[in-house]
Amino acid sequence: MKLMWKAINAGNSFDEKKNIEEIIRKKHSKAIAETLYGQKLKCGVYACVLVVFVALMTYAFGYLGLHLSFSSIVPLALAGLFLFIKTILECSRLWILVGRWDDQPLKESSRLFQQRLERIKMIDFLLALVYCYGWAIAIIRILIRDYEGLKGLSVFVVILILLLLLIPWLIRYQHNKRYEDMYINLNQSTDFFNNYF
Amino acid sequence: MEKEFIELINTHHGILWKICNVYFYGSSYKEDYYQEILIRLWKAFPNFKGQSTFSTWMYRVALNAAIDILRKLNVRPECVGLSGKEYDKADNAETRSENYDKLYRAISTLPEAEKAVILLYLEEYEYKEIATITGISEINVGVKINRIKSKLNKILKNGKE
C-alpha cells in the first residue's frame, strides 16, 4: 500500500504552486467566507428585528400603558417567540462556525468541538425554557386573575400553554436532528480515538 | 515571518494537496478548501515554536482544518466523493492513473479520523509522531493502522467494505 501511495504521488508532482502571499492576505477562502457572511447576516437581521420588536413592545406597554385584550396579545407573543427562537438558533449556528482548535491533537479538537456543540444545545434549551416557561406562567397568571374574561378562549389558551411548555424540548430535538450528521461523525471519531484494541 | 512561512509552505505544499485529495476527493471546491487550510496554517503559524518538525506541525493544523471544514459544512465525508461524470468534471485537471483513483477513492470512504491516521502512515511517519498529531497512544496507533489497512484492503479488493 505504501508503494502504491508513493507511486501515485510521485506521478503527481503537485507542481501547481499557488500564490501563497495573495491567499494568506484573505480572512477566509471564498466558499467559507460566503457561508460565514450569510450566517452573520441572518444573525444580524433576526437580532435587529427582535430588538426593534422588544423596544416597540416596551414602548407600547410600558411607556404608553397600552391595554390590549388577551386575543390581541397572543399573536404579538407568538411573533416575539418566533423571532426569539430564530435568533438563538441562528446565533448558535454562527458560534459553531467560528470555533476552531487547529493547534490541538485531533483527539482533543474533536472533544472540544463536541463540548461546544453540547454547550450550544444546553444554552439554546435553557434560553427557550426561560422564555417559554416565563410566557406560560404569565398567561396562567392572567388566566387566574381574569378567568371570566378568558373563558371563551379556554381551549385556545390551553393549547397555547401546552405549546409554550413543549417548545424548549422541540428545540432540543431539532438541534439533534439538524446536527445529526455532525454527531455521527463526532461519535465515530471519539470511538476511534478512545477505543483500546 | 511571512517570508519564512511562504518558504516552508513551498517546501511542503505536497502535504496540503494530499490532505485535500484525501478529505475532499472529487469535490469541485477542493481548491477553495486548499486556500482555507492555507489561511488557517498562516493564522496558526505564530504558535509554531519548533518543538516538532514543521511538517509534523503542518499535518496537525491542516488535518484539524480539513476535518473542521467538513464538520462545519455539515457534510458527511462519504458525500464528498463524487462519482461518474460529476467526478470527472470536478477533477479533470489532474493527471490520474487507475491506481490513483482506486486508492484515493478507497481512502475517501473511511471515517475522518481513520483518514488522518492512514495518511500519516502512508507518509511514513513514525508511530510516535502519529500519536502526537492525533492524540492516540503510541501502542494504539499500531493497532489502529492494522485495522485500517485490512479495511482498506477489503475496499480495494471488493470495491466496498
Image (cartoon, rainbow, N blue to C red):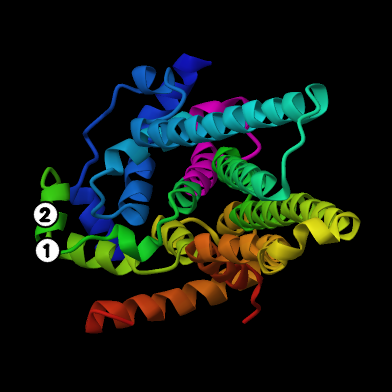
Left or right: A125, with B125 as reference point: right
Q: Residue at x 35, y 75 (%)?
A: B152
Q: Secondary structure at mark 2?
A: helix
Q: Is residue B106 above or below residue A38?
A: below
Q: How many marks?
A: 2
Q: Is residue B13 above or below residue B89?
A: above
The residue labelled by disc 1 is B84
Q: Residue at x 22, y 60 (%)?
A: B82
Mark number, residue B61: none
Q: CA distance from mark 1 to mark 2?
A: 7 Å
Q: Residue at x 63, y 58 (%)?
A: A107
The residue labelled by disc 2 is B88
Characterize the local packing of mark 2: few (<14), some (14-19) or many (20 or more) Cα atoms within 10 angstroms.
Answer: some
Chain ID, mark 1: B
B13 or A141, which lies in front? A141
B73 or A94, which lies in front? A94
Magenta span includes B62: yes
When asked about the image quadrant of residue A73, the answer is: top right
Q: Is residue B127 above or below residue A47?
A: below
**Residue A19 image position (x, y, % from top left):** 30, 21
The three-letter code of the residue at mark 1 reads Gly
Residue that lies at the very extreme toward the right in this rendered image = A145
The three-letter code of the residue at mark 2 reads Asp
Circles 1, 2 touching at the beta carbon (< 8 Å): yes
Residue B41 visible in the current orientation: no
When asked about the image quadrant of residue A51, the answer is: top right
Left or right: A106, with A160 as reference point: left
Q: Quadrant of the C terminus of chain B?
A: bottom left
Residue range highlighted in magenta: B40-65
